[in-house]
Image (spheres, coloured by chain):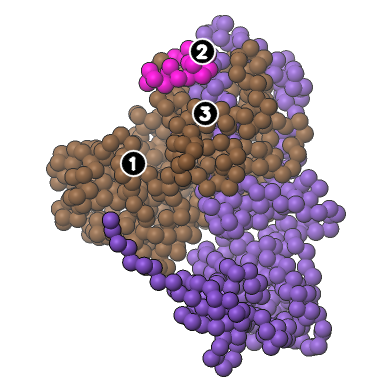
Amino acid sequence: MSNPLADMDKPDVIFCIGTNMTECHPVAATALKRALARGAKMIVADPRRIGLADLADVYLPIRVGSDAALLLAMAHVIQRDGLTHPEFIASRTTDSEAFLEHVKDFPPEWAETITEVPAADIERAARIYGEADKGAIYYTLGITEHICGVDNVQSLCNLALMTGNIGREGTGINPMRGQNNIQGAGDGGALPNNYPGFQPVTDPANQEKFKKAWGREVDLENGMTKVRALELCGDRIRAMIINGENTLLSDPDRKHCEHALKSLDLLVVIDIFMTDTAELADVVFPATAFGETDGVCSNTERRVQRLRAAVPPAGEAKPDWWIISQIARRLGVPGFEYESAKEVFNELCSLSPIYAGLDWDRIEHGEYQWPVPHKDHPGTPILHQGEFKNGRGIFKLIKYRDPAETISEEFPVWLTTGRRLASYHTRTQTGRSAGIDYLLSEESLEVHPDDVREWGLVEGGVCQLTSPRGSVEIKVKATNRSPRGTVFASFSFSDVPINALTGSGYDPETDTAELKVCIVKIEPCERVISPRNSS
Amino acid sequence: MTTLAEPTVATMTLDGEEVTFTPGETIYEVSERHQKEIPTLCYDPRLEPFGGCRLCVVELEGARAPVASCTTRVTEGMVVRTRTPAVDSYRKVLLELVASENRELDVDPLRGYASQELMTLVDRYDARSGRFAGRQSGQSRDDDDNPFILRDYDLCISCYRCVRVCAEQEGDYAISIKNRGFDTQITTEFSGLLKGSACTFCGQCIQTCPTGALADRKAMRAVDQPGKIEKTRTICPYCGVGCSVDLLTKNEKIVGIHPAMDGPANEGALCVKGQFAFDFVHHPDRLATPYVRGEDGQLHEASWDEALGRAADGFRKVVDEHGRHAVYGVASGRAPTEAAYTMQKFIRVGFGTNQIDNCSRA
């Protein structure tokens, strides 16, 4: 997030796109509700009539995967109606002329044909955001999990840049990160293109720095992404070590994924449960869990916070860093003589400019948001205040692209996927917590009531959901939350592995999978699914 | 040099001492800053002042009767006395009346974060006299069998903190108040179960309840276990918001969660997952030993020595046969940052490659 969570009750216009915040980041959503109670306006764009839509001043039920078209048309209206922020554009940005010319080609009437949202609603949303004194954008994977995820994010940046809604309190471009430490995984350097602290591996200065720190040469070019590595399993990739990820259920195209992992010479998994993925491993190591582990995590607002152990580990479970270090030591790799998480974290701080002002003892109370470039620095709650990291904000000329697959005679329905409030990811944790089944014990496919009738389905009955990649049986639930022609399910339940269907394409720049769009056909089933045994 | 307007210093007299205040502050807020320990039952600093319980009354010079300090804003020159025999007596009688309505006062602290408030005040003001044979207000909802929130309204004192936290803090408006006086009942629309309401089971109503009338059913499973409750501050293991929580442990087991009221990301708020989905930690399915795949193709329990040896041999063999680029590392978005750091260092230093990623591409 460019801005802190504490800012979320401060905007006068909130624009939520591709974020089901009341279910996926419920505590953050409470701040938005407080802003609304104080009179802020909210625009919500989402194919599904999610909880936020009920609170919105303007709800834009866009067709799945049409975000870029909507955002182009909003930029068109803002430009046409003179709602841009000329001083901000002049002093903080570059390439604005070409962009402001470019958006003239994309009026709301054009976007209506793609997004299926009335042009008048797009106009209204654009004017509300364009006229905001403090306009804040919030998004989640509904923006990024597309073949055009980068385009979508850059389209949002364009809107913020043209209206000057960045670098101030109550504004910004704010992705809500989905996992407790997905930010920290990047901070720690677990990326094929960056050393710790987002230092590019292709930069000779960084290569020199880490060669000195670690005492060995590292490749000068980027590694491959996990998506590519999975494609090359059994070919160029022969051994994989996976820490705390149930790849098989969470990644697209389960069949492909299972085949990939099975074709490895060596699969090592470190986890807290025998997940579907761990079942395929040659070696499984038991890791300590929440409440058993000392460590550090970074949240969605770049706040660096301490994790503390309160109970002893289950059985012989060990901290992840210890397990990885032991393997390294067995292989004779130097530099893994750590005695504690504190030693590991302090080494990271010494090598990462964004953590340079931090160490284990300084983050005791969690008041720092990175970058913290030196010991006297208070941290950076709001990014891009004086200037952007690379100087000026750059407008990008984005064009709309269709999703990797579009509905056809054979697959006439859009499927989109996501999470639900009472289950988390692949339910390895929530599925093993008492009481959660009372709220959500099984997966169901959310279908518009008129589609239920038209497709010959029965509420509570079972249907066969088939994509070009696979097929699952799933219970039918009629709900107005789904628009006509689009259905929804989560990927949480292993008995309904929705990711057997997904995986039509990937963003060419980031390799992020298009998990939010999949084409399917739906057929009624005779079979009856018995209620799950909620043990 | 710029000239700044001299900030006006507003002052009042608090228990005979001249103190400053910021315009807009209430008598209660100023008194709290000066450690006056004014008793309250309907007050939660996160919520709008309500003025319902009247325990926070103080003497204000010029006012006919004591005023509620939580709703009265300070004005210049105000003279306030927070403790006088009359005020103390007033508070004691009020507490005796409140206590007379409840089935019990001494509730287990596992019921909720604020559950000890009434009990503590009753003892502080020596108000267990039993002088009033009270009628009970609030009827428990034994029929609500949800596994999270015990609705033991026999202990309800109509402070409305639950209703207000649900509306003001959560924006959910799942519960409301039916009737008044002794017939007051906290309820959902159509008096149904919480599951049939807008309730998201975030547990905020439990944690703000000052009597234990709303209680944490999961934590209460450990009430009869011997041992002291200990608290450890950590961060919720679910989404990226990073809510601070206090783990409640008894005999080296996690028995419940309190939201951290001073958590920088959540300021006391939690959701159903952070509040209630903690017991996976002690689930019998937890991996307790390493496993290695045997010649029979099955995974078998193994010693650390054997498993580490197998992993190391495997990596060595792959590098020998297919080169160092054939090894790939995937770090976790759920494990601590040290896990990600050591994983990337293992790949970069162990194999000299950048064949490392995490699960953020889904």
Residue beneath the point at 15% across and 53% down: A80
- Assess whether mark 1 and mark 3 are in contact (beta carbons under 8 angstroms): no
Residue lying furthest right? B226
Residue ranking furthest to the top: B320
Point 48% across, 54% down: residue: A28
Q: Chain of mark 3?
A: A
Q: Position of residue B70 (x, y in %)?
A: 56, 77
Residue at the location (76% across, 86% down)? B134
Q: Which residues are magenta?
A: A203-219
Kindly identify the amino acid type of the residue bearing the numbered disc 2.
Answer: Arg
Q: Nearer the viewer, residue A54 or B349?
A: B349
Residue A350 circle label: 3
Judged from the image, the secondary structure of the residue bearing numbered disc 3 is helix
Whole-angstrom CA distance, mark 2 to mark 1, is 37 Å
Query: Hey, which quadrant is residue A152 in on the image?
Result: top left
Q: Nearer the viewer, mark 2 or mark 3?
A: 3
Please name the amino acid that badge 3 sits on: Ser
Mark 2 neighbour density, 10 Å: few (under 14) some (14–19) many (20 or more): some
SS type, badge 1:
helix
Q: Please tell me which residue lies in front, B168 or B198.
A: B168
* Residue located 74% across and 37% down the image: A313
In the picture, one chain is purple; tell me its letter: B
Q: Which residue does the numbered mark 2 point to in the structure image?
A: A216
N-terminal label among 2 and 1: 1
